[in-house]
Image: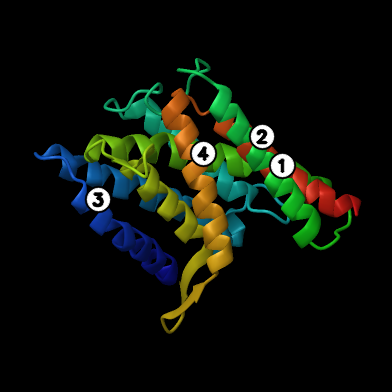
């Protein structure tokens, strides 16, 4: 677990300059920064806990069901007990703000591109119902609630609402970078760095697009649908080859 905590610290250090660059004046920045770091560290710790301690895996299988359940439960409890962040601010609403044409187009493109890439790049696999069930549900529940819900809202509270590249907020960039780092960057024993640039680009751009939809619609509904099916369909296509 020591190496895991070094990874968590590395991810936060990499986004810290952006947070400092765009910080709001006053004490609120430091308060929300500490809350953000606390949430991120606990979230990652719970996700990795069953990997480092298999005896804590209360759901058996080839995928990290237990870690995903723990992180999802933590996010829900955080929203219940942390009174300075409402469920609406975290995107837990069915109501969609503004025109939906562009968000729906983005959702369609995410699913289409990921499915095509899955059909081309992912090698043929045997049918595995556990994999399909996991990809359809758990990454979405965990990651959308944590990254595009809670952490996006916390960074928005800590930073100025300046837009980068027209409609991309600094909070979007920060949370998308974190999302890319946790998927593609790692430190191993001896401080050896492993970085997968293509995987980073894929997860970073996916994070940007999904967070953009959240900020445009005020809801996690469309990003959750996009995330679920863009994970599920590529795996299904690979299994049907």
The residue wearing badge 4 is 210
Q: Give me the residue at 30% from left, 50% from top.
A: 37
Earlier sequence position, callout 2 versus callout 4: 2
Q: Is residue 2 above or below residue 86?
A: below
The residue wearing badge 1 is 112
Earlier sequence position, callout 1 versus callout 3: 3
Q: Nearer the viewer, mark 1 or mark 3?
A: 1
The residue wearing badge 2 is 108
Side (left or right) of 136 relative to 20: right
User: In this view of the protein, which residue sits in the foreground, 126 or 202?
Assistant: 202
Colour scheme used in the picture?
Answer: rainbow
Q: How many marks?
A: 4
The residue wearing badge 3 is 19
Earlier sequence position, callout 4 versus callout 3: 3
Quadrant in the picture for residue 229: top right
- Badges 1 and 2: C-beta atoms under 8 Å apart? yes
- Distance from Cα at disc 4 to Cα at disc 3: 20 Å
Q: Give me the residue at 85% from left, 59% from top.
A: 125
Q: Is residue 95 above or below residue 183?
A: above
């Amino acid at each position: 677990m020591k190496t895991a905590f070094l990874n968590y610290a590395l991810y936060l250090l990499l986004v810290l300059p952006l947070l400092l660059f765009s910080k709001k004046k006053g004490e609120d920045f430091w308060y929300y920064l500490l809350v953000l770091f606390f949430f991120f560290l606990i979230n990652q710790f719970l996700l990795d806990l069953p990997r480092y301690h298999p005896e804590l895996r209360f759901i058996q299988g080839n995928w990290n069901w237990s870690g995903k359940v723990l992180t999802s439960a933590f996010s829900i409890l955080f929203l219940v007990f942390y009174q300075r962040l409402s469920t609406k601010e975290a995107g837990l609403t069915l109501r969609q703000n503004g025109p939906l044409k562009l968000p729906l187009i983005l959702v369609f493109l995410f699913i289409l591109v990921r499915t095509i890439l899955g059909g081309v790049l992912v090698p043929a696999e045997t049918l595995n119902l556990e994999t399909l069930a996991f990809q359809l549900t758990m990454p979405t529940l965990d990651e959308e609630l944590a990254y595009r819900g809670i952490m996006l809202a916390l960074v928005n509270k800590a930073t100025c609402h300046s837009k980068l590249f027209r409609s991309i907020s600094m909070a979007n960039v920060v949370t998308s970078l974190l999302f890319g780092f946790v998927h593609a960057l790692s430190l191993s024993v001896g401080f050896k760095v492993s970085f997968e640039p293509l995987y980073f680009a894929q997860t970073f751009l996916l994070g940007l697009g999904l967070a953009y939809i959240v900020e445009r619609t005020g809801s996690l509904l469309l990003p959750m649908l996009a995330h679920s099916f863009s994970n599920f369909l590529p795996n299904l296509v690979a299994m049907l080859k």
